[in-house]
Amino acid sequence: MEDTYNIKAIVLNRQSYLENDGRVMVYSRETGKLELTVRGAKKIKSKLAGHLEPMNLVDIMAVRGQRRDYVGAAVSDCCYGNIKNDLAKLAAAGRAMKIVDQLIKPGLAQAEIFELLKDYLEALEVAKKDLTFLASVFIIKFLARLGHQPELSRCLSCGTTLRPGSNRFDLARGGLVCAQCAKPGEINQLAISNNGIKLLRLALKCDFAELAKVKVEKKLGREVETVIEKFLRYGF
Ligand SMILES: [Zn+2]
């Protein structure tokens, strides 16, 4: 008898493989990142293929294979139609899938990463504006869940509680340093405003639905996005 298991997963990407088959990379609540073969994916009207589009939330019955497990059955739970019909949303979602795929190794299940991805897709699905800010919030939450939560309350050099002032975000050490400890001219220490720090804290603390209600001034949003993007590019 076939050895099977059920997972709830988000499809990160899909590739053709051999003549008729395909492969999907998924992130599931139960297994973490997992690559599965999709047999007959290229056949016309493959029932499976439609359910396994990238970004779909899908219930999969996987079958253990000798080399690689494969998809026995798949039913999409949510296809996020608004994302797929909007190029900007599609790009924002696609980038998240790519970052998760790049930074996570297979085999380590972290339910909170699955939930974060799902929450992000749900937020994008209903978002009316400010997709770039939403995308940055996803990145910082994701890095935090990987164990790289930036230190935002104490100076990483002297340990004192940070006060409003000329604090800087140290990319190499992943957090703030106070005005006294900041090194002038150090390009890996970014200037960050007091409101920028508050917004970063908020991004880590609040869920997407709560953040959607926060009115973020454009300039402040860009400032925080820049810090998050540079943090991602510097360290990961
Ligand atoms: Zn200090």
Image (spheres, rainbow, N blue to C red):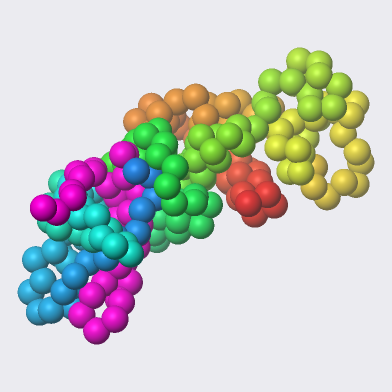
Task: Tell me the magenta residue range.
Answer: 1-30
User: Relative to 124, does residue 86 appear above or below in the rendering?
Assistant: below
Task: Indicate the quadrant where residue 165 lies.
Answer: top right
Q: Position of residue 102 (x, y in %)?
A: 51, 57
Q: Residue sitting at 87 percent across and 34 percent down?
A: 182
| Residue lying at 69% horizontally and 52% vertically, measured from the top left | 234
Q: In the image, is 113 to the left or to the right of 164?
A: left
Given residues 18 and 197, the one toward you in this image is 18
Task: Evaluate whether residue 120 shows in this view.
Answer: no
Q: Position of residue 6 (x, y in %)?
A: 19, 44
> Which residue is more in the foreground, 196 or 75?
75
Residue that lies at the very extreme toward the bottom in this rendered image: 19
Please check the rendered image and state whether residue 2 is part of the magenta-colored stretch, yes or no.
yes
The location of residue 54, given as percent across then percent down, is 29, 60
Relative to 11, say whether 126 is above or below: above
Which residue is drawn at the image coordinates 42% and 47% (left, top)?
107
Indicate whether residue 135 is drawn in magenta. Answer: no
- Per the picture, the main secondary structure of the magenta-coloured stretch is strand
Q: Is residue 56 left or right of residue 73?
A: right
- Which residue ends up furthest to the top in the rendered image? 161
Looking at the image, residue 154 sits to the left or right of residue 50; the answer is right
